[in-house]
Amino acid sequence: MSKENQEEFSLELLRSGDRAEIARLVDAHSANIYRVALKMLANTQDAEDVLQNTFFKAIQALPTFEGRSSLSTWLYRIAVNESLMLIRQRKPEFDLVMKPDDDEENEHLLTEFTDWCCLPESELMSSEAQGYLDEAIQELSEKLRVVFILRDIEKLSIRETSETLEISEAAVKVRLLRARLVLREMLSKYYGEQLDAEKRG
């Protein structure tokens, strides 16, 4: 993620609706916003809709943007909310409220782990392995998925992730740990099969 300082964009120009400055902002953040939406939704059309809606809403709100958070954090927050709204449309029972004391993921029991040290790097980095990781990310609950995407894929800091999701830093750390453990279990099954194939070969 671009670690831009607020000063890299003129808030005065953005608030006044300057087209060139807004175009710079869109160019600087479109790829990141689209990537987050795609990882959240696993659908290119939905990701494109989130991208468009994010900047449409941001441009509308720029005149009142106070700069309390960075522009990137603010844009991520809009994109995450847009993604979660689409998820809610698909699953009306999904609770959008990110409660920091929500502990339901503790019910998941982690049972299977594989040592990946023996796999060649090409196997770990293969398109097949990446595809399996993407599928595994989709299996995470929305609350864990969004934290993992922002922290481990987009490389936001704990503080930035906390600000984006408007939850405590402690909640970010707990959910990130859970997400990593659940993904490790799911990926262990995949890499375990790859190790078995290596041994048979």
Image (spheres, rainbow, N blue to C red):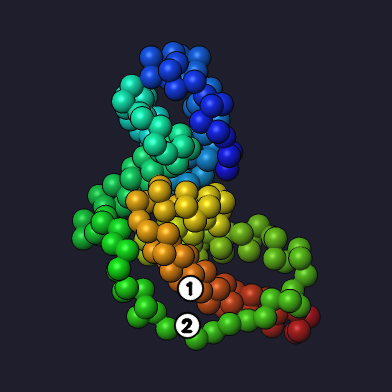
Place of residue 60 in the rendered image (x, y in percent of width and height, measured from the top left) = 32, 24
Mark 1, Cα crowd under 10 Å, few <14 / some 14-19 / many 20+, is many
Looking at the rendered image, the quarter that the N terminus falls into is top right
Q: Is residue 9 depicted above or below 169 in this figure? A: above
> Considering depth in this image, is 34 or 175 the residue closer to the camera?
175
Q: Is residue 179 visible?
A: no
Q: Is residue 187 left or right of residue 163?
A: right
Q: Return the residue at label 1.
A: 182
| Residue drawn at (32%, 63%) of the image | 100
Q: Are marks 1 and 2 in contact (CB under 8 Å)?
A: yes
Q: Quadrant of residue 119?
A: bottom right
Q: Return the residue at label 2.
A: 110
Q: Is residue 196 depicted above or below 65 in this figure? A: below
| Residue drawn at (45%, 34%) of the image | 71
| Residue drawn at (43%, 17%) of the image | 12
Question: In terms of sequence position, does the residue under pointer 1 or pointer 2 come before the other?
Answer: 2
Residue farthest along the left direction in this orientation? 93
Query: Which amino acid, mark 2?
Result: Leu
